Image: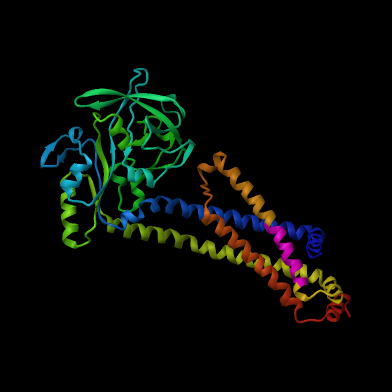
């Protein structure tokens, strides 16, 4: 009965309810964009958060620079092959996480564009999975060397194989790779090389988005497993791209020694992890504070909307509430009519909002407006709806809870 009454109320005041519906949809959409914007920033921090909270250093190398191999011998970067065992021994680190690279060419001479793969160790491979347009992420235990590529690379698609020439002790070896995934355009790639002037001291500089149109004239980038390459093609040589050196000992003396040892491997950038983590937290906090005024405005808008619509609906239906009360309903049950009315509007607003959000994700609009469906987004939208419903329930009780049915009828009749 109460639900049917709420539906009748909606039909009797279509203009006001349509305005409320549009307003609620706008609030939900703005909230989704805002939460997604923050999620994008936190999504790339979370995979490396516990690393940055550790004691250690982060190093970035360049293939065009010279290097010092373990043992103190200066060599060309192209000859500086660092194994994990060498890194452990030379830096005296308790843990080393690495990304390695090399410049490769397709075996098909008609495809003369080079590629710069990034080979992740098992730890980093399991931590961060970039967004994929199709296919799946890498498996280190496959019988084939699996790769994830940007769309259009050498005309390959999921399931195809690509033959590439890789360095092998001053010669070249043909390596067959199986495409298992296609990167989503614009996805953030961990360890992607940046221009020197773009390096910074927050976690975001460890990532670089890959845009197909922008990268069309430069090298291809694809991702693979370092352990899978070492197992299937142990003779292939790689060079260091970047590395985390961690120590279980947080003393100042150990930290200073680790920093010194890591620096001997000739990185072009070396940053203590505690500095990077502190700056990253400051950056995330600033991003949150920038969104705080929007949050306050949205909450005010939701509350005002709920109060206004509930007040108007309650005033228009006051005579009906008096009759319901005389027939045996309590004021709380009468107020529940407004709650059901608001619930119907909320469900409709959520439905329309999700359709619009999914549409935006599947259209070119996704290139400018990032929408991420995650638990934080669901929680935020649910919070907006709950606030709206609470005030929709409270307002009728405040208006009619202290009056009698006779007073309501007299007000409506002008007596």
Residue 126: x and y in percent read 38, 45
Magenta span dominant secondary structure:
helix
Question: Quadrant of residue 213 in the image?
Answer: top left
The span shown in magenta is 333-346
Q: Report the side of 250 relative to 108 (left or right).
A: left
**How many numbered tags mark residues here?**
0
The structure residue drawn at horizontal position 19% and vertical position 48%, both measured from the top left corner, is 262
Is 324 left or right of 86, judged from the image as shown?
right
Residue 282, image quadrant? bottom left
Q: Position of residue 180 (x, y in %)?
A: 44, 32
Task: Please state the horizontal and vertical placement of residue 185, each as a whole percent of the image.
Answer: 46, 38
- Residue beneath the point at 19% across and 26% down: 169
Please indicate whether residue 185 sits to the left or right of residue 112 in the image. Answer: right
Say above or below: 87 vs 341.
above
Quarter of the figure with residue 147: top left
Is residue 342 on the magenta stretch? yes
Quick one: 111 or 30, which is closer to the camera?
A: 111
């Amino acid at each position: 009965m109460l639900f049917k009454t709420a539906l009748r109320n909606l039909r009797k005041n279509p203009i006001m309810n349509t305005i409320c519906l549009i307003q609620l949809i706008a609030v939900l959409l703005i909230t989704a964009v805002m939460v997604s914007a923050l999620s994008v920033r936190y999504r790339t921090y979370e995979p490396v958060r516990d690393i940055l909270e550790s004691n250690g250093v982060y190093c970035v190398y360049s293939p065009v620079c010279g290097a010092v191999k373990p043992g103190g011998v200066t060599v060309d970067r192209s000859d500086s092959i660092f194994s994990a065992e060498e890194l452990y021994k030379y830096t005296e680190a308790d843990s080393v996480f690495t990304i390695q690279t090399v410049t490769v060419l397709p075996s098909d001479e008609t495809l003369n564009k080079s590629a710069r793969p990034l080979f992740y160790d098992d730890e980093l491979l399991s931590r961060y999975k970039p967004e994929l347009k199709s296919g799946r992420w890498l498996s280190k235990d496959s019988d084939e060397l699996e790769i994830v590529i940007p769309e259009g690379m050498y005309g390959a698609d999921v399931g195809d194989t690509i033959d590439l020439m890789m360095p092998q002790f001053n010669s070249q070896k043909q390596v067959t790779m199986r495409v298992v995934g296609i990167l989503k355009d614009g996805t953030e790639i961990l360890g992607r090389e940046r221009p020197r002037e773009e390096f910074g001291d927050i976690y975001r500089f460890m990532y670089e988005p890959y845009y197909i149109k922008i990268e069309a004239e430069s090298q291809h980038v694809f991702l693979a497993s370092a352990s899978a390459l070492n197992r299937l093609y142990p003779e292939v040589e790689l060079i260091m791209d970047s590395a985390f050196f961690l120590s279980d000992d947080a003393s100042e003396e150990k930290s200073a020694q680790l920093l010194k040892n890591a620096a001997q491997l000739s990185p072009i950038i070396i940053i203590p992890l505690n500095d990077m983590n502190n700056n990253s937290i400051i950056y995330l906090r600033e991003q949150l504070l920038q969104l705080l005024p929007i949050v306050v405005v949205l909450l005010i808008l939701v509350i005002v909307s709920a109060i206004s619509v509930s007040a108007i609906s309650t005033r228009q239906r006051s005579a009906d509430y008096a009759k319901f009360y005389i027939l045996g309903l309590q004021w709380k049950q009468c107020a529940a009519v407004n709650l059901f009315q608001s619930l119907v509007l909320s469900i409709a607003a959520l439905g329309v909002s999700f359709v619009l959000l999914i549409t935006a994700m599947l259209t070119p609009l996704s290139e400018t407006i990032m929408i991420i469906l995650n638990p934080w987004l669901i929680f935020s939208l649910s919070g907006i709806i709950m606030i709206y419903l609470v005030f929709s329930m409270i307002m009728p009780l405040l208006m009619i809870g202290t009056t009698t049915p006779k007073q309501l009828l007299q007000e409506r009749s002008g007596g």
